[in-house]
Image: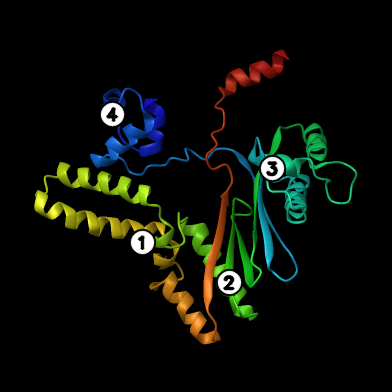
Amino acid sequence: MVKELRVKTGAGMMDCKKALTEVNGDMEKAVDILREKGLAKAAKKSGRIAAEGLVAICMNEDNTKAVVAEVNSETDFVAKNDEFKKFVSDVAVTALNTDKETTEELLNEKYLDTDATVQETLNDKIAKIGENMSVRRFKKIEVKNGKVAGYIHGAGKIGVLVGLETGSDSEEILSLGKDLAMQVAAMNPKYISRDDVDAEYIEHEKEILKQQALNEGKPANIVEKMIVGRLNKQLKEICLLNQAFVKNPDLSVEQLIKEVSKKLGTEIKIVSTARFEVGEGLEKKEENFAEEVAKQINS
């Protein structure tokens, strides 16, 4: 548990041990304690990214509907295999063309124009390639009055979709959408705007920031002002519209959208986003290499 907490927060071993002892092993409370003491570098709730695989995007012809899908493999070597790449791409195509919403339902769909299901095709690939694989997830975005733009980063390690509601069919809308998708890939915002941030999250962060300020020995009469300032700074980092635009940090994303909107003479609104990073939230099983070799020799 100490090791897991160190991975999540970047704090020292003894600090992690003390925090866990203080809260009787409650991992989330231990993360909060370390943050309050300023010892945690970040609360990485998703855990270490270790699983391999690829993310693929598929769109319809008029860019009003798109899907992003993730398929995992055991090794990066298999993820670079052409047959695996094609399978991931075909899974995205299948997901786009179905009205099903869950991975379990998708696995039971017909794989392209074959008689086999996605699950049966997956089983065949596993037998042929000799490595376990899984269709992990997919998400579909559809915008009836607007466009969906996408971006793939790192040869399939990150895939992003952005849905834009607008009355324009200009190519500049898709260009803007791709820039916004790149922004989401790079900065990984949690919300589109401040209006989307739930009250529970705000209250939780206020309490953390309050304890940080008090632990720093700040006078009680200025703590509230400090909380407001620090919270606003944090919201700028996690809300897409408030982030500095990566291609031009002098502009916020919101200002960028307003500029393009004014130029095209139409309102533009981000209505949805999806960001998949290969293996996020999964942790690969660690094996002793010597033991693994011996195991294979013995078998």
Across and down, in percent, residue 35 comes to: 29, 41
- Check disc 4 and give the amino acid type: Ala
Sequence-earlier tag: 2 or 3: 3
Residue 160 placement, left or right of 69: left
- Check disc 1 and give the amino acid type: Lys
Foreground disc of the pair 1, 3? 3
Foreground disc of the pair 3, 4? 3
**Mark 3 surroundings within 10 Å by alpha-carbon count, few (fewer than 14), some (14 through 19), many (20 or more):** some
- Quadrant location of the C terminus in the rendered image: top right
Q: How are the colours assigned in the image?
A: rainbow
The residue singled out by tag 3 in the image is 103
- Identify whether 72 is placed above or below 164: above
Instruction: Please say if the residues under marks 2 and 4 sit with CB atoms less than 8 Å apart.
Output: no
Residues at marks 4 and 1, CA–CA distance in whole angstroms: 29 Å
Sequence-earlier tag: 3 or 4: 4
Sequence-earlier tag: 2 or 4: 4
The residue singled out by tag 4 in the image is 19
Across and down, in percent, residue 209 comes to: 25, 48
Foreground disc of the pair 2, 1? 2
Sequence-earlier tag: 4 or 1: 4
